[in-house]
Image: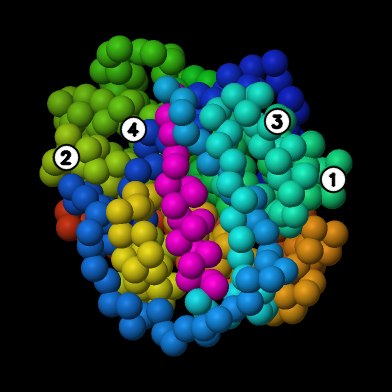
Amino acid sequence: MRSEVRPRRFTKRPAMAVAAITAVAALITTAGCSGTSGNTADATGVGSGAKADVKALGPGAKNVPKENPVEVGVLYTDDNPLGVAPEILDGAEAAAQYVNSHGGVGGRAVKIVACNGKNNSQSNAQCAAKFVNSGVVTVYGLDALWGDVGVSVAAKAGLASQTMPISGPEFAASNSYAWQGSGFTASAAAASYIADQKVVGACAYVDVPAFKEQCVDYFQKPARQLGAKTSVLAIPPGASDVSQYATRLSQTHAKTVLVTSSGQVAQQLIKSSAQTGYRPQWILPSQRADFFKALGSQVKGVIFYNDLVDSSDPGNRDAAIFRAAIAKWAPHMTVNAFSTMAFSNIVTLARLGNQVGGDKITRAGLPSLLAKVKDLPQFMGPTLDSDNHLPGFPHALHTGAYLYQWDGSTYKRAGKGYYTVPGSTG
């Protein structure tokens, strides 16, 4: 069923910087197990010191020339008390090792140019200048203020930005070509799941603009267009006791509840709701291992969303390659949404290079290639096509999200598994 829901056009608000930092801090806090499970290490079996069958890597193409490499900017976060994500760089470096041992980007090696955004404007501006002044052809990764600072600087230099979208420009800017959907596609996937299940739904969020958008614009509006009855519940930032909000949530009679917040708030909601006998189907962003440990059996049955196929998925060939690559080149890396994203982006770029020819992957040429992508298999994701994009955003080609349900020991796809954003073209 197709709707005509169009996402609200992003405008820059005075609170955007604070909201972005708050949102990315929560993402960094909660995303420790996207692509992992609730085991004390991680659910993929590729955690610290783990082994994987390297046969999944297949035969490598040796001796990719180091001259004339494809330089890729990698933006990561470190040295900030709000949260860090150095695993973005780890994932990118592992991907470069894999790509360079398997033919490169259309025969050209990948070279990583890394920069720590530190979740502050000055560092983001410095990273933007570093990327512009180097030979990078695009920028991957994540940092809270890249959308407010880096995207525009990159645009002036004709540099494509493909960071994870957490603020307006990362979706809407002319030089933004997001290969991830983040909270937008995840919230819409939850709405589609609820409509598919024909149940009453709700979305609970910590009351900052970024999380409110996910609940109000990207969850509730599509759900209503699909005929599902939903409500939203705001939780004040810094609330020390969420029991009253758990009670209010139960009064909505929602059978399925999406939570967009930090892992701690989600944990408190689940515990408080269970104490009152209210046990809905929860849909959450992926969580760290300590979340599973704290909730124990209460996590069983919870649905988690991912931009990409979960790396523990036993039936996905890309996931097997990822597990083997990490076991070989980054066995101590934290496997989560960010490291998986970085790995996926670079391998997907290599696939594009193999498709069009490595000589065409240049700063000047890449934007036009990204704008006209055809039948490009995203690593651990769907096939990308420029004719199929998010409503209102012709350069945002990832139009859905994966839902996985934790059964107490492994992840299994929930419902249809992959849900597209209502109104997506194509």
- Classify mark 4: residues with Cα within 10 Å, few (<14), some (14-19) or many (20+): many
Return the x and y of residue 139 as percentages of the image width and height: 66, 50
Disc sitting over residue 126 in the figure? none
Q: Tell me where residue 276 sits by quadrant.
A: top left
Label 1 secondary element: loop
**Mark earlier in primary sequence (2, 4):** 4
Query: Which of these two is toward me, 26 or 365?
Result: 365
Residue corresponding to mark 4: 263
Which mark is in front, 1 or 2?
A: 1
Q: Name the residue rendered at 79%, 64% in the picture.
A: 362
Return the x and y of residue 205 as percentages of the image width and height: 45, 27
Q: Name above or below for residue 70 compared with residue 336.
A: below
Q: Give the amino acid type for the residue marked by disc 2 in the picture.
A: Lys
Q: Give the amino acid type for the residue marked by disc 3 in the picture.
A: Ala
Q: Give the amino acid type for the residue marked by disc 1 in the picture.
A: Ala
Residue corresponding to mark 1: 157
